[in-house]
Amino acid sequence: MTIVFKVSDNVKEKMIDFYKDKKRDKTPPYAIFQAQEEDTIITLYNSGKAMFQGISADIDANIWIDLERKLNNKIIDINPKKENKNKEKLNMINDASIGSDEVGTGDFFGPIVVSASYVSKEDMDYLINLGVRDSKKLTDEKIMNIAPQIIKNISHVTFILDNISFNKYTKLGFNMNKIKAILHNKVLVEMIKKENGKYDKIVVDQFVYPKKYYEYIDQALQKATNITFMTHAEDKCLSVAASSIISRYIFLSHMKKLSNQEEIKLPKGAGAQVDEVAKKIADKKGVEYLDNIAKTNFKNMEKITQNKE
């Protein structure tokens, strides 16, 4: 997976600082740096173009996309040079399908929400006219407007993994991709039962190689199989796009509840603003309290705990 977009000067400076300890020895021509974050290679060019490559590229890129929106109120144009060349209809998959997608894996605060939806051929025009597409390309306001209509009219299943449960998984040694695979399998199995053979395809946006995905769910008592794994599935399959929007809507709703509970607005993503808010909460309630509202395996925790030593 490759995601390319242009960042503003202030975001560029923050990226340079953020990745300063993760730089590779060699820097490509015309680049400021090339760094590696887990499975993602990040290259920042002098022009301000940022390129994220790897299976988890969308997770790492979304941190900076969110920051660009917050700091500069700017809607990111993803892969701008390829947009006209590779533009595809959202309903490229014309088969009735079950598709799943998750939200929250790149956010320090808040749960992980994964949904699976069933979209029949009869549903397609309705969703297209509603403006359904990948939730990362829609504003929060648009999502809050159309998601209730999708939830009401489209068959779906949603599972919410709270922060306490997520942190228990990671302490057992589960990585993010394994957690995602388990959750996708959970909602897909339920959706298959619910629709009982109405679908032609099961589609998952590929976040890991298929062989590894099935290894991750090997211990599951029930498994969804015969999955079509597809990169950028949210742009090619309406059931994945619908699931993306439903998951985002529920995630945003939970973030609002958590913000009200903590009496401070919890920012999305995992950037500097997140660190500031997390430090305030830790100062008030203790570092251990973050286990209830945040993903404590994120690198943000290192900065918070270092200040407490």
Image: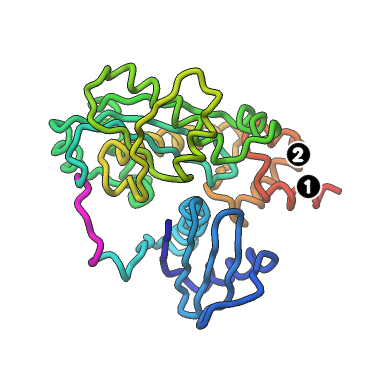
Residue on which disc 1 sits? 305
Residue type, label 1: Thr
Judge whether 51 appears above or below 190 on screen.
below
Mark 2 highlights which residue?
287
Q: Position of residue 95 (x, y in %)?
A: 19, 36
Q: Which residues are magenta?
A: 84-91
Above or below, comparing residue 128 to residue 155 in the picture: below
Quarter of the figure that contains the N terminus: bottom left
The reply to whether callout 1 and callout 2 are in contact (CB within 8 Å) is yes
Secondary structure of the residue carrying tag 1 is helix
State the image coordinates of residue 22 (x, y, percent, origin top left): 66, 64
Residue appearing at x 17%, y 40% in the figure: 94
**Along the polypeptide, which appears first: circle 1 or circle 2?**
2
Give SS at disc 2: helix
Q: Would you call the spot at circle 1 few (<14 residues within 10 Å), some (14-19), or many (20 or more)? A: few
Residue at x-position 53% and y-position 27%:
218
As displayed, is residue 204 above or below residue 71? above
